[in-house]
Image (cartoon, grey):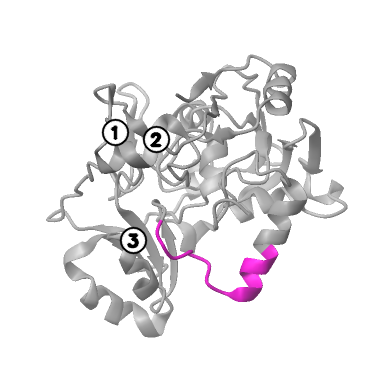
Amino acid sequence: MTTIVEPGSWEELAEVVTTTDRLVVGRGDLFRNTPERTLHEIVDFEFQTEYPIGTEEGDLSSKARPSVRIVQEQLPQKFELDTQNQTVTVGAGIDFSLFLFDLAQTEFTVPHHYQVKSLSKQAFSCQGTGSVYENAFQSVGDAIATNARHALVAQHGSWRDWLLSAKVMLADGSIIQSGAPVVKSVSGFDLHKLMIGARHTLGILLEVTLRVVPRSSLSRSEFIRNDDHQIHLWNFATHGNRNTILHCPDQTIGVARETFAEDVIAFDPASNTLWLECFPETLAYLSKFGNVQANFWGDEPEINSPQAQALMRRTKQLFDPTNKLNPGEFGFI
């Protein structure tokens, strides 16, 4: 079985990282883990039942290798808001919802579409969204590592625009600092930008500094949710929800909406983004319409450019030569 470890300090985390051959980092459906890599797929977390040998899930999981899942909730969760420079420095392991509640006590926020609606009721307003992000990520670090498109990306940008600096633990247990809390102080390579969308394959985010904006300046999303669509769950534990994000150029968005009409969960006209329910074999076809981000391990890689594939492989080899961290776009290298 997968062992769950909750280190209470960066030193304890470094000891786990340096003494473990296989790590699972991140909690959410957008993190790729093949059944050959980890035993955790054999457990249905809702009912705590194991899939037996002789079933498709059990046979795949029987090939797994023991691993350690890192839970960062007990790590130091720093929270420092700099109102003058409009930045916030926060522990990457803090729950994303809790982070937004802390920010909601101030006049600032991160311009993600997922926002606090009522402090007294602890309710969130997703501006038309909801289940399309329900299981995508849990912590601030997870949100950065997945870099899933949100419904305000056209108005306010993405994590690539908001992330100013980061402390990152590498696969050898060492900690690096990249960037700076103040833009004018930044020098050197922006290595922290490599962590955006990397799904914890290159390092473990420990602490990040983000741009914030006044809550009063937050735009409203044009997000349109298809309330007639019901998201279905696979019983196949490896795949879970079949949520896929498709970002289209102007010339293909109309055709894509018509082609996948019954599978559309939601649509953001401002950024030409579709949230879909689909099967792995659909991914290659989806890529004809635009850029795809899926939350399951399909037979086809999402990145199909040979140049991009070569760059991703080389980057993974440099940062994590023993494949200790999460598998990349291509699983084991």
Residue in the picture at 57% in, 42% down: 326
On whether residue 303 falls in the magenta region, the answer is yes
Q: CA distance from mark 1 to mark 3?
A: 24 Å
Residue in the picture at 69% in, 28% down: 17
Q: CA distance from mark 2 to mark 3?
A: 22 Å
Discs 1/3, front? 1
Q: If the image is split into quadrants, where does the C terminus sit?
A: bottom right
Q: Which residue is mark 1?
A: 53
* Residue closest to the eye, 248 or 99: 248
Question: What is the x, y in percent for residue 110?
Answer: 53, 43
Q: Is residue 40 left or right of residue 76?
A: left
Amino acid under label 2? Ser
- Marks 1 and 2: CB-CB under 8 Å? yes
Q: If the image is split into quadrants, where does the N terminus sit?
A: top left
Q: Is residue 42 left or right of residue 174?
A: left
Magenta region:
298-311
Question: What is the x, y in percent for residue 145?
Answer: 56, 45
Q: Which residue is mark 2?
A: 62
* Residue closest to the eye, 223 or 276: 276
- Mark with earlier residue (2, 3): 2
- Mark with earlier residue (1, 3): 1
Amino acid under label 1? Ile
Q: CA distance from mark 1 to mark 2?
A: 7 Å
* Residue closest to the eye, 214 or 18: 18
Which residue is outermost to the left?
A: 228
Q: Which mark is residue 280?
A: 3
Amino acid under label 3? Pro
Task: Examine the rendering and report whether any part of residue 323 can be seen.
Answer: yes
Question: What is the x, y in percent for residue 331?
Answer: 54, 52
Residue in the picture at 27% in, 30% down: 52
Q: Is residue 330 above or below residue 320?
A: below
Q: Is residue 271 left or right of residue 322?
A: left
